[in-house]
Image (cartoon, helix red, strand yellow):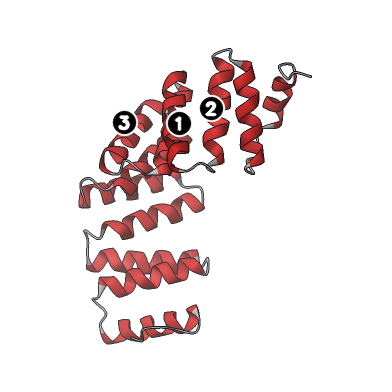
Amino acid sequence: MKDSYDNIDEYIADLQAEIKENENCANHYYNLGVALLSKRDWAAAESAFLDCVRNSPRFAEAFVQLGGICLQRGDLEGCKRYNEEAAQCRPKFPAAAANIGFVHLQLGEPEPAIKALKKALKWDPDFVQAKASLATAYFMVEEYDEVLQVCKEIIKKEPAFAPAYNNMSLAYFEKGEFDKAVQFADEAMKLGFDVAPPYLEELKAHRKG
């Protein structure tokens, strides 16, 4: 294969040619799947990742990608199942644990979400998306001080991560600290976050001036 390509279609064609020469190379199937994802060709990408794991049944990254495709089409259980496969293939795989936690959140199951997300962060303490999901999970179980602690950790590493400011606003509101709730909601909006209109209406009563 070449070191560089003029466009993604040339790269895909080269991978397909390589696969014809060696139909058992899991890496080629995986790379093909990633390339097809960049074109949003979900069905063809799924087929490539399935071929990858047929040839290498412990290729954890491919299971994570398959989970992502399931999530794209709204199949939460499929996403969770594939990420559980990835976690079995590679213990201490932060991406798989974080994705499992995210699915539990979407299913309204904060307790198992917290457990999975803590695992992800144990193995990758700087995993910002996992921290953001953990903050949401803590909010769902009304652990508002935990929400604030996690969000402050996020902002320390990623000062422009808008969802963290929104979660801080929500937590301060529930704690009755309305000035801070207003402050952090406004900060979230400055950074481009779409704060929920009903919540903004609630905040109006607590704005000064």
Which residue in the structure is indicated by mark 1?
A: 152
Q: Are marks 1 and 2 in contact (CB under 8 Å)?
A: yes
The residue sitting at 37% across, 69% down in the picture is 48
The residue sitting at 79% across, 19% down in the picture is 209
Q: Is residue 117 left or right of residue 74?
A: left
Which tag, 3 or 2, sits closer to the chain's start? Answer: 3
Does 30 appear above or below 126? below
Q: Amino acid at mark 1?
A: Lys
Q: Amino acid at mark 2?
A: Met
The residue sitting at 26% across, 48% down in the picture is 93
The local secondary structure at tag 1 comes to helix
Which residue in the structure is indicated by mark 3?
A: 115
Alpha-carbon span between mark 1 and mark 2: 8 Å
Q: Which mark is residue 168?
A: 2
Figure quadrant of the N terminus: bottom left
Q: Nearer the viewer, mark 3 or mark 2?
A: 2
- Residue 152: quadrant of the picture: top left
Does 23 appear above or below 50? below
Coordinates of residue 26 in the picture (x, y in percent): 26, 71
